[in-house]
């Protein structure tokens, strides 16, 4: 079974530039999550999708972050304009359903450095 | 609200020592799930175990064991006869069934196993 695919693995940008991250979840997984992991901290949920609908985006800084999951499969997370504090690893995860019991499978992450 | 505390920021042990990683959680739900994930230097979060709130039996898997105690809201993780390959950051996570479908991660404990 193929895992969760993410790209790019690394990205370096200047502040105020824009960046986009892509995630392809495990086939058949209805729920997709984007987490932000700042160095030395635990992952923090940014947005959760169930199929192509948003379940929770309460912690997404909507003035600069946006995410979509067209057709309920792949997802893209965009940051525009980026700030220094956005430097982090952006983790995508998927699960079969969005219930509490489901195990999340994570991708390798996309490391963003904002200069 | 959900909360996970991992009071130990960093632990160093010498190979073959036993080590216990602490996890304390807060939840208002009666049905919830607790997880441990490992994040090796490569960065990908790897699932280790899931327990539900109705099953307080301790679990052993090889050198790993988990002690779940609802009375103290703790879900501790012990590695017996640690090995260098156990060096990683370990995260405890909580997912509620009724009040939220989101994983909430603790801040993590960095374990260094020295040869």
Image (spheres, grey):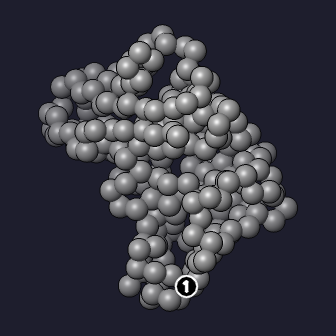
| Pointer 1 residue | A81
User: Chain ID for label 1?
Assistant: A
Placement of the N terminus of chain A among the 4 image quadrants? top right
- Asked whether A19 or B100 is in front, the reply is B100
- Asked whether A3 or A70 is in front, the reply is A70
Classify mark 1: helix, strand or loop.
loop
| Residue at the image position 80 percent from the left and 52 percent from the top | A51
Residue A7 rendering spot, x and y as whole percentages: 59, 68
Placement of the C terminus of chain A among the 4 image quadrants? bottom left
Would residue A74 appear left or right of B100 to someone viewing this image? Answer: right
How would you rate the neighbour count of disc 1 (Cα within 10 Å): few for under 14, some for 14-19, many for 20 or more? Answer: some
Q: Residue furthest top?
A: B57
Classify B4 as above or below A27. above
Residue A79 rendering spot, x and y as whole percentages: 58, 77
Would residue A29 appear left or right of B105 to someone viewing this image? Answer: right
| Residue at the image position 28 percent from the left and 21 percent from the top | B80
Name the image quarter holding residue A56: bottom right
- Asked whether B95 or B58 is in front, the reply is B95
| Residue at the image position 45 percent from the left and 87 percent from the top | A15
For the image shown, how many numbered marks are present on the structure? Answer: 1
């Amino acid at each position: 079974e193929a895992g969760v695919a993410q790209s790019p693995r690394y990205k370096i940008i200047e502040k105020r530039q824009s960046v986009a991250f892509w995630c392809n979840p495990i086939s058949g997984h209805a729920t997709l999550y984007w987490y932000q992991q700042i160095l030395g901290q635990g992952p923090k949920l940014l947005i959760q999708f169930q199929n192509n609908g948003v379940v929770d985006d309460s912690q997404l800084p909507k003035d600069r972050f946006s995410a979509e999951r067209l057709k309920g499969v792949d997802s893209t997370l965009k940051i525009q304009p980026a700030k220094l504090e956005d430097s982090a690893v952006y983790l995508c995860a998927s699960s079969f359903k969005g219930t509490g019991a489901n195990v999340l499978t994570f991708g390798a992450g996309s490391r963003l450095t904002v200069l | 609200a959900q909360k996970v505390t991992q009071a130990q920021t960093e632990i160093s042990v010498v190979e073959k020592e036993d080590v216990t990683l602490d996890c304390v959680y807060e939840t208002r739900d009666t049905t919830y799930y607790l997880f441990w994930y490992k994040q090796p230097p490569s960065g990908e979060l790897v699932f280790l175990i899931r327990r539900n709130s109705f099953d307080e039996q301790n679990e052993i898997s090889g050198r790993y064991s988990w002690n779940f105690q609802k009375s103290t809201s703790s879900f501790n993780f012990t590695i017996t006869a640690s090995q260098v390959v156990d060096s990683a950051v370990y995260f405890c996570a909580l997912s509620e069934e009724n009040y939220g479908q989101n994983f909430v991660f603790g801040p993590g404990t960095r374990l260094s196993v020295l040869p």
